[in-house]
Each structure stands twice: as structure tokens, then as C-alpha cells.
Image (tube, grey):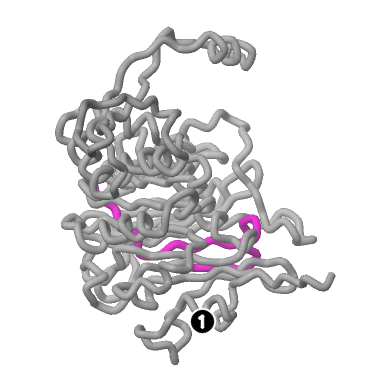
Amino acid sequence: MKISLIEFSTENFKIFKNKVTFSPLARKSEHTFDSNGENLLKTSLIYGPNASGKSTLLQALVSLWGGITKSANNPEGSSLPYQPFILSSQKDIPVFFEIVFSLDKKIFKYNFSFLQNEIVTENLSEILASGTEKKYLVRKRQDIKVFADFEKSKDVAEIKTRKEVLFLSAASQWNNELAMQTVDGFKKINVINGLDSGNYRGYTMHLCKEDESKKKILDLLQTADFSINDIEVKKMLLPEPIIKQMSIMGAKEIPDKVDTVFFIHNKFNSKGDKIGTAKFNFGDESTGTRRFFDMLGPIVDTLENGNVLFIDEFDNSIHPYLTKFIIDLFEKNNPKNAQLIVTAHDTSLLSHKELNKEQFWFTEKDKFGAGNLFSLAEFKTQRNDTEFSKKYLEGRFGAIPFIDLEN
């Protein structure tokens, strides 16, 4: 079941004291696709200085994702990932998440709030074409009311949903069809931490074992000019030092062999004639090559299935031409209407002639240390042919660090 993101909000989460809302809704253009009557952007980019909330926005999304897909497995009495605005003197204010999404032929709005040890509110409704809302779920702590498709799951609401568990997550485990479809859709959302993209390396290696997927990954590496002629994935003995380290760290199971990636490069003589090939261990490749490879699995998966991909620190160790290359994949080679949302510092993308101002967002902190989020489209006087990169660095839009070299 395919999900498309229409809007995401958070409040009282880490740096965000007040409610902030991100949305890929836009005017109809070559950058958008139609999802149940809504024009949604294929790509969106979020800029801002360090510690202004870019990564926190994605962390909020990951927390919402985790609650929906995993909270039914929370042990009784377990703590929730409660991380309220860190500079507030107020106590026991719930963290709030809300998402509006398209699923199949319907649009839903889902939100929940929570404290350290309990879900405070939880609501699900369908947004009808008339603009009115059809209620499916209304929850205030353990007072859980269900309607429509959820009425058959009253026992889940009354008996099987503990205070640290979301009803939506619990209902999916008790075979409620709408809950299962929603949870399955959210499970297909990919989130890459740009500073630790290696978490997806195993998935990319797995795809390289399938001929069709391997060809797509290899084609992308070759198009991006990495001079890689082929990819091999082999089972290799785990080095003894790593085995010892895993043992020290308390690993319960230590495999004898692990999948290892090798890249095949052509060899040439002094005249430029090909004389054979050389096999490079993955660890011998550059940081940028390794990171680009790690990201290709989720990128290929997202494009093939029309899912949503978030990448934090998008431009970390990646050349500006490669970030533009990835953007162009979603802009121009995206028949299933996948969505790419990234955080970045690379201002050259602000000068991408084929992107418009609705695709750029900014985060910044106010004088009290609270984060804010706003769109470049809010600057009404800016035309799409404006040099956004130059104006951003001049401070015209805010969201840049103030560096006082005199102190």
C-alpha cells in the first residue's frame, strides 16, 4: 500500500517549542504529481544553520514512524521517546506529532501526543472532498472511541491497548484491515541519516544479489562517473579483531562470514589500452563512493515503488554534481511519483535552474532558542528566476548562522 506525504507537524519536540508544519503541497507544475486531488512536490529541500532544527524535523518523523509501526511491541510500563522542548521551564507538556497522508484513494489525518509513560491523545480521521472530516478514532488517554472501519476493533480499544501503546499500532496486530494497510504503508518510508548511511549498506548489498536491481545500481554508479565496471557481493570470513570486539561488546551471535562488497575497476597500460581488471575492497573506496553506494538501495527501492525517502545531511561527503544527479532522478525519472525530502547545506542546489521556490524550506532559531520552519514561497516578492543561493548567503531569507569574529 503506497503512502504519499501531504503534511507533517510537530510541537514541543526537542528544539521545536511551538507547532511547525512542513508540507510538499504546491501549485500544479512539472515538479508535482496528483495524489487524490492534491498537487504534491516530488522533491523538497530544507536548509538552515547547524542546530536550527533540520535534523530534528526528520527525527520527529522517525519518532512518529516508530510509534505507528512498533509501539504495539512496547512492554508494559515501558518509557516512550519523550523529548520535549529542552529550554522550557514548563513540565509535563505532551510532545505532539501529526501527519496528513494519502493512502490508496483516501486522505487521512492522524495525530497523537504523549508524555514519558503514556499516550495522552490519539486521533484518526479521513478528510473528505467537501473538506469535512470523517472520524475513525478519538482517544483521550485510555478513553478510546472508535468509529467506521474501526468499530469492529472495539475490543482492541477497550482491552488490548495499553497506555504506552498507540491504538493504530495495536489494531494492526489484531488484523484490522485499515490499521494494517496504514502500518504497512508507513513501513515503506525510508529515512537515511547522512552521517551514518552505512545502516542501509546491507540493503543495497542485498539488492546487488538480484540481477535486475544490481543492473540499476551499477548503471547509476556508472552514470555518476565512479569508473566502476562491476559489483561483486561475497561471503567473507569475519576478521579476528572484529570478532573479539563484538564479543567484548556482548554480541549474542557472531557470524563466521559476512557479506562483503567488491568493486571491479578496469586497468589500463601507459598507452591507455585496457589490460584487465582490478578488484577493490569496499573499504578501500573513497568515503563519497561508499556513501553514494549505501544510499542507492533506498533510492532504487523508493523510485521503483513510489514511496517516500528522507535523507538527513544529504550533501555529506557527496559532490554537488551528485546531489543534483539524485535530485534529477526524482524530478525526471520518477514514473511512480516517489517523494524525496532532504536536509542540506549545499547552497548550489538553491541555484538549480529547474527547481522553484516552493521546493525550498528553512529552519532557524529565535532569540529564546526555539526552532522555526518556513518556506521560501512565503517570500512573495521572490521570482523563480531569482538567484536564491546568492540571496540566501546574503541573509535575505534568514536561516544562516551569525558569526561574530570580533569576540
- Nearer to me, 160 or 249: 249
- Nearer to me, 21 or 131: 21
Where residue 402 sits, quadrant-wise, is bottom right
Q: Position of residue 56 (x, y in %)?
A: 57, 55
Q: Is residue 117 left or right of residue 20?
A: right
Name which residue lies at 34% across and 68% down. 133
Where residue 358 sits, quadrant-wise, is bottom left
Q: Badge 1, how many Cα within 10 Å: few under 14, some, many 20+?
A: few
- Nearer to me, 325 or 123: 325
Q: Which residue is mark 1?
A: 391
Q: Is residue 53 above or below residue 168?
A: below
In the structure shown, which secondary structural element does the residue marked by tag 1 occupy?
helix
Q: Is residue 167 visible?
A: no
Q: How many marks?
A: 1
- Nearer to me, 323 or 20: 323
Q: Position of residue 152 (x, y in %)?
A: 30, 43
Q: Residue furthest right?
A: 407
Name which residue lies at 19% across and 35% down. 273
> On the rendered image, what quadrant is the C terminus found in?
bottom right
Name which residue lies at 63% across and 47% down. 82
Q: Residue furthest front?
A: 271
Q: Position of residue 246 (x, y in %)?
A: 57, 15
Q: Is residue 300 left or right of residue 200?
A: left
Indicate yes or no whether the magenta region holds residue 96: no
Q: Which residues are magenta?
A: 1-21
Q: Position of residue 321 (x, y in %)?
A: 36, 58
Name which residue lies at 40% across and 85% down. 386
Kind of residue at badge 1: Lys
Q: Is residue 105 left or right of residue 225?
A: left
Q: Is residue 283 left or right of residue 26?
A: right
